[in-house]
């Protein structure tokens, strides 16, 4: 029997070590030690980690790589970012959106990031971002699963044509219904927008992913309405609440009521650690709130939690490199999830959990799954996060689509080894 590709001696995220992975026709056929069959291509993993691809369930690809256009965000706040994006929207072209997005997708591939859910602003009457990203979704189809969310950035009711534009974007082929209830003029309008948007999704058989309560206001409780509408309309497991930062500031008693409601409704929670830690708490002196939602508590109720990147070099965030290990690292620091088991969980927050939130088919490293994976210069998921490990090879449909040389530095120190390999520093575990 012969295969297209065999990966030899791999460690897997679930703790299995020294296994081989055999692929044919774009699928994984066998995962077991010591496969002796022939293959068109063989990758020696050498005890390094082979992981399913990274997944980013919350991003803004219409704005990415626009940093400095038309000017920099001076205050660094969410609201100046939204105002700045408003200025940029006026002068946006489809070509510019496509060019920047494709450039970002190249970077994503190099980082082993092969599935992205991006919000796309529908409050521009020309729907420039929608047109651009629909084209990009098509052009990257062979190597990135790109999901588009119709996002009424300026408010479903606050922006005059938002609902009309959102429906048009869905007609054009945008996949998911978005929202921003905390940005509507009043709490009532916010709640009304959640209801209306969930109804649109239910009518059309679509998923929902809302920017929900991205504020430090402990009274911003749209997640409660989102969980309620999800149950009322039978949308369980098809709805995500993105950000949920107000939960950071909420009263503990109220949260003790809210958590089971989110769990019952099977709403996915998506935190965005890099952005939450920089944009929230801006009105605080000291102590400054971190803003990240209550990840360990959501987890304890069985809620599916993901970490998204949200922004890279755009009006809201000047940093970022499509590195979901950086996102996981920030997430675990902010949530103080530092036990070995917690860190492994945070790795899942940038792989299997967002894959579940996005309803990706045949994701994983089991027989029958798509032959999509990443070989990292690290032995396990904890080391991968610690080192922001080099993506040695990125495989899509059983074919290597990106290669990066291993990181190894030559030393010139008397009486010391000649080189240093970051992945050779292991913990002293029994
Ligand atoms: Fe966002």
Image (spheres, rainbow, N blue to C red):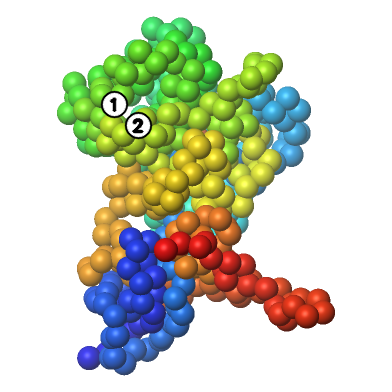
399 versus 347 height, above or below? below
Dots 2 and 1: beta carbons under 8 Å?
A: yes
| Depth check, front residue: 317 or 350 | 350
Residue 122 position, x and y percent, is 47, 31
Q: Is mark 1 on a helix, strand or loop?
A: helix
Q: What element carries label 2?
A: helix
Residue 5 position, x and y percent, is 36, 82
Mark-to-mark CA distance, 2 and 1: 8 Å
Whether residue 130 is visible to the viewer of this picture, yes or no, is no
Disc 1 target residue? 262
Q: Which residue is drawn at 31% across and 73% down?
A: 26
Q: Which mark is residue 298?
A: 2
Pick the quarter of the image with the N terminus.
bottom left
Q: Residue at x 61, y 75 (%)?
A: 405
Is 365 situated left or right of 399 in this image? left
Task: Name which quarter of the figure residue 31 lies in.
Answer: bottom left
Q: Residue at x 57, y 35 (%)?
A: 275
Q: Residue at x 34, y 36 (%)?
A: 299
Q: Does the residue labelled 2 lie within 8 Å of ligand 1?
A: no
Crowding around mark 2 (Cα neighbors within 10 Å: few <14, some 14 to 19, many 20+) is many
Task: Name which quarter of the figure residue 33 lies in.
Answer: bottom left
| Depth check, front residue: 205 or 126 | 205
């Amino acid at each position: 029997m012969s295969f297209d590709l065999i990966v030899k001696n791999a460690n897997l995220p679930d703790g299995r070590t020294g296994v081989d992975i055999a692929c044919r026709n774009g699928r994984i056929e066998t995962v077991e030690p010591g496969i002796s069959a022939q293959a068109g291509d063989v990758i020696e993993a050498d005890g390094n980690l082979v992981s399913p691809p990274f997944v980013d369930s919350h991003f803004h690809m219409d704005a990415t790589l626009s940093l400095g256009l038309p000017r920099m965000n001076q205050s660094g706040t969410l609201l100046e970012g939204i105002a700045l994006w408003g200025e940029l929207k006026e002068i946006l072209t489809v070509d510019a959106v496509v060019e920047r997005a494709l450039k970002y997708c190249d970077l994503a591939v190099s980082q082993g990031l092969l599935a992205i859910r991006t919000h796309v602003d529908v409050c521009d009457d020309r729907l420039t971002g929608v047109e651009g990203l629909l084209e990009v979704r098509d052009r990257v189809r062979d190597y990135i699963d790109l999901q588009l969310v119709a996002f009424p950035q300026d408010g479903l009711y606050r922006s005059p044509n938002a609902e009309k534009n959102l429906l048009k974007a869905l007609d054009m082929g945008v996949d998911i219904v978005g929202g921003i209830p905390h940005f509507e003029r009043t709490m009532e309008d916010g709640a009304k927008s959640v209801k209306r948007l969930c109804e649109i999704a239910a009518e059309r058989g679509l998923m929902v992913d809302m920017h929900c309560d991205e504020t430090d206001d402990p009274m911003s409780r749209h997640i409660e309405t989102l969980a309620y509408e999800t149950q009322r309309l039978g949308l369980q497991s098809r709805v995500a609440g993105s950000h949920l930062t107000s939960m950071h500031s909420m009263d503990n008693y109220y949260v003790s009521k809210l958590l089971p409601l989110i769990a019952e409704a099977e709403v996915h929670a998506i935190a965005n650690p890099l952005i939450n830690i920089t944009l929230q708490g801006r009105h605080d002196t000291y102590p400054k709130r971190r803003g990240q939602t209550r990840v360990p508590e959501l987890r304890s109720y069985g809620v599916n939690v993901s970490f998204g990147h949200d922004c890279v070099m755009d009006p809201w965030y000047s940093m970022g490199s499509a590195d979901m290990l950086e996102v996981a690292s920030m997430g675990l620091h902010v949530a103080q999830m530092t036990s070995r088991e917690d860190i492994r969980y945070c790795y899942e927050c940038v792989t299997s959990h967002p894959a579940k939130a996005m309803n990706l088919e045949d994701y994983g490293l089991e027989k029958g799954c798509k032959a999509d994976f990443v070989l990292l210069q690290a032995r396990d998921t904890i080391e991968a996060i610690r080192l922001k490990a080099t993506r040695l090879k990125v495989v899509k449909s059983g074919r290597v689509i990106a290669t990066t040389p291993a990181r190894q530095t030559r030393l010139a120190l008397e009486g010391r080894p000649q080189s240093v390999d970051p992945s050779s520093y292991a913990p002293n575990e029994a």
